Image (cartoon, grey):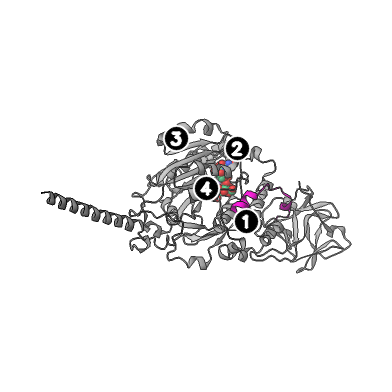
Amino acid sequence: MSFVVYLSRRSRTIRLLVFGVILVLVIYLLATYDKDTNSNFRLARLTQNLGERQVPRLITGLGNFEPKEIEDRDGPGEKGAAHHLQPSQQNDIDQSESDYGMCVACSDEISLDRSILDTRLPECAHWDYPTDLPTTSVIIVFHNEGWSVLLRTVHSVLNRTPKYLLKEVLLVDDFSDKENLKYDLEKYIEQFDGKVRLIRNSQREGLIRTRSRGAVEARGEVIVYLDAHCEVNTNWLPPLLAPIYRDRTIMTVPIIDGIDHKTFEYRPVYGEDRHFRGIFEWGMLYKENEVPERELKSRKHNSEPYKSPTHAGGLFAIDRKYFLEIGSYDPGLLVWGGENFELSFKIWQCGGKIEWVPCSRVGHVYRSFMPYNFGKLAQKKKGSLITINYKRVIETWFDEKHKEFFYTREPMARFLDMGDISEQLALKDRLGCKNFQWYMDNVAYDVLEKYPELPPNVHFGELRSVAVTKCLDTLGHGPPSLMAVQHCHGFGNNQLIRLNAKGQLGVGERCIEADAQGIKLAFCRLGTVDGPWLYDESSHTLMHRVHKKCMALHPQTSHLSLMPCDVNNAYQQWVFKPLTPK
Ligand code: UD2
Ligand code: MN
């Protein structure tokens, strides 16, 4: 009897042991399961290169995520069509244009749930993505935005995002003072049963710090930032999450379509099969460039993500913890501008990547002008505040050689006080980041093709006419346009003229040329840094080497043109007067 008990006990132990071993084996196999070897995993190319820091996840399956039904609605602005108001509404149109930089009166007549056209490449509908993508907080920071425009952003996210992936829409109010935003939003978002959360700054922080606060407060694994005047397109989120799922150091960026600020027409930004990426010129203005062959060819399908040196700033997805680990944004950046470069240089140089995702499209309203001021934070004018931000960024991330290009293009930046960047330099050190030359050689290798190394300025400052003590001025016009002389105001800007060692006369990012009509502000020829001008310091003449004539001011009409050179004519004499920092 006791022998039988002994035997059965023993066999139970063996059975338990065998079962345990099998269990451990199954868990091990699941945890180390390599998704790339799964032939069903159609994103194999898209998401390979498992980063070292990748936490293995259990794949629970693949899903297509495409909506089951086509949005078929009729009404103003539906299918992304332009909506035109009546002539009798002109007052409202003008009022909202001046309050918001866009026609909020027009937006008010369009459904918050309106349909828009699917602007993606057709093949986008056929990708599968892992079903256990990370949960997401969509963070929308806002300051004095139009009610219907802000809420259409929220509705579009709720309507076009898989519920289980959307942890929350987090609205962060940057101290708005519009009545409806201040008093009615809490009530409005009650209908969303906690899916939409609202927090408010107790003072104006600017968009950069407000975004960093959003990251701290968010509850999702991934955070996605949107401006408060966006509409997300069909199945926009899974393609942004998939690259991050495989490598948490990838930041992903949707393709930004345009929403017209007057009619709210939703328009694809460019032909669906042409791809652009973010670069910059040496004054740190953001530019887009057609993606180089080298990068395009590294992919199998035209709808796959591609690497980009930088991004426009507003719309992107990033692993929340990763964003916090790399210090989110430099807290020394003020209000608006430059944060897109700061984050991009930091990500690339410190081991991460930026990918633009053609299958994710989001519409954005580009305003006619910036309707808000920078509040108490800005002791200075908007322009110099943005340049200070650029200076912090380049002083942290550029090397000596490339910093010089920035100061050549923005000579007054040398005199601006950028505050203390020692924390940023320490962070760079701590994260073991690569240098700027590495970034230029390996990531932003198309920048120099468009914006070559800048020769130093031989002169810069106001260009004063000796005859009338007035200064050459763009009058704030864009190119192509005639230039003129104006009262010298000493602030630079439209009167800050630079002559470089290769004869190029520039103002801001533009060039000064001459033709039969006169002296003109022109687009600089991409890829060139030379020009026709020769300044003679003894006679003070500015000669155009091709036409062999000199820049002259008409004594009566003040018209500027090229005239046969006459060194004794005061109307052909110009002096570069250095500007003093203000
Ligand atoms: C672009 C970016 C923007 C930001 C900016 C540079 C896109 C489409 N837009 O300018 O996201 O990166 O460049 O910094 O890439 N806001 C605040 N507080 C402020 C000012 C603005 O919360 O003090 C909000 C504003 O309501 C909006 C967002 O920040 O939701 C971006 O501002 P914007 O739309 O005026 O910037 P934008 O699109 O001209
Ligand atoms: Mn915007």
Which of the two discs, 4 and 2, labels the residue nearer the N terminus? 2
Q: Is mark 2 within 8 Å of ligand 1?
A: yes
Please identify the residue farthest to the front as the structure is shown. 2
> Residue 59's x, y, as percent?
35, 55
Q: Nearer the viewer, residue 367 or 175?
A: 175
Give, as a three-letter code, the residue at label 3. Answer: Ile
Residue 73 rendering spot, x and y as whole percentages: 39, 45
Side of 255 relative to 547 (left or right)? left
Segment colored magenta: 410-428
Mark 3 or 4, nearer chain start: 3
Q: Residues at badges 3 and 4 in contact (C-beta under 8 Å)?
A: no
User: Magenta residues: mostly which secondary structure?
Assistant: helix
Foreground: disc 4 or disc 2 = 4
Name the spot of residue 148 as percent of width and height, x first: 49, 38
Residue 484 seen in this snapshot? yes
| Residue 324 badge | 4
Instruction: Please name whichever residue, 112 or 317, is drawn nearer the observer in this view of the structure.
Output: 317
Give yes or no for residue 414 being in the magenta stretch.
yes
Q: Secondary structure at mark 3?
A: helix
Q: Which mark is residue 189?
A: 3
Distance from disc 1 to disc 4, alpha carbons, whole Å, reads 18 Å
Amino acid at dot 2? Arg
Q: Which residue is mark 1?
A: 397
Marks 2 and 1, how far apart at CA: 28 Å
